[in-house]
Image: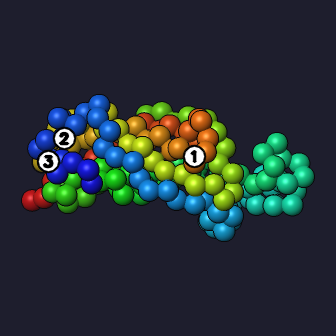
Amino acid sequence: MAHADYRMATLAHFVDREIGVSGWMTVDQPKIDEFADCTGDRQWIHVDVERAKRDSPFGGTIAHGYLVLSLAAPLAMEVGIIPPDASAGLNYGLDKVRFLTPVRAGARIRNRVVLTAAEPKKGGRVLVGMRNTIEIEGEDKPALIAEALAMLVGTQ
């Protein structure tokens, strides 16, 4: 985590600030296939390598948009979106998601996280908003931008 004073009590001071940028993660064909197996979404553009090379406008397979979206949370945790004095961070929802650029199999992605809101709640909880920008190495446009919400629970 880049900010030593990033704590439950100081979250409001970090609103509209970048919390951090994750490391690069490779989205390879085995990861795409595992997601397809788990969800049942086995569209050829994701899992049929030969057909995608031949028929896809992307020259090969691409990751499921929801696979890329699902990677936003662990990459946000990597940058430290959950303060060290929180006992838990729970997904609360999404306000807006836009899929902008497909992620080709084998591409590397990372998450640029900006804290957009910090609303204190009862019981020492804080509802935070964050903008997740999933960047693709070597691409000008991001894969997606997702405005997500998480409920942070303070230590008791």
Q: Which residue matches tag 2?
A: 11
Give me the residue at 27% from left, 54% from top.
1
User: What's the amino acid at mark 2?
Assistant: Leu
- Residue 116 point in image, percent of width and height: 31, 33
- Badge 1 density bin: few <14, some 14–19, many ≥20, Cα 10 Å: many
- Say whether residue 92 is visible: no
For marks 1 and 2, give the CA distance.
28 Å
Q: Nearer the viewer, residue 10 or 66?
A: 10
For marks 3 and 1, give the CA distance.
30 Å
Dot placed on the residue nearer the N-terminal end, 3 or 1: 3
User: What's the amino acid at mark 3?
Assistant: Asp
Residue extending furthest right?
54
Say the numbered circle drawn on residue 5: 3
Give me the residue at 90% from left, 52% from top.
54
- Residue 47 point in image, percent of width and height: 76, 60
- The answer to the question of whether label 3 and label 1 lie on touching residues, with beta carbons closer than 8 A, is no
Q: Which residue matches tag 1?
A: 136
For marks 3 and 2, give the CA distance.
9 Å
Dot placed on the residue nearer the N-terminal end, 1 or 2: 2
User: What's the amino acid at mark 1?
Assistant: Ile
Give me the residue at 41% from left, 53% from top.
22
- The answer to the question of whether label 1 and label 2 lie on touching residues, with beta carbons closer than 8 A, is no
Residue 142, quarter of picture: top right
Residue extending furthest front?
138
- Badge 2 density bin: few <14, some 14–19, many ≥20, Cα 10 Å: some
- Badge 3 density bin: few <14, some 14–19, many ≥20, Cα 10 Å: some
Give me the residue at 53% from left, 44% from top.
135
The residue mark sitting in front, 1 or 2, is 1
Numbered circles on residues, count: 3
Query: Helix, strand, or loop for circle 1?
Result: strand
Dot placed on the residue nearer the N-terminal end, 3 or 2: 3
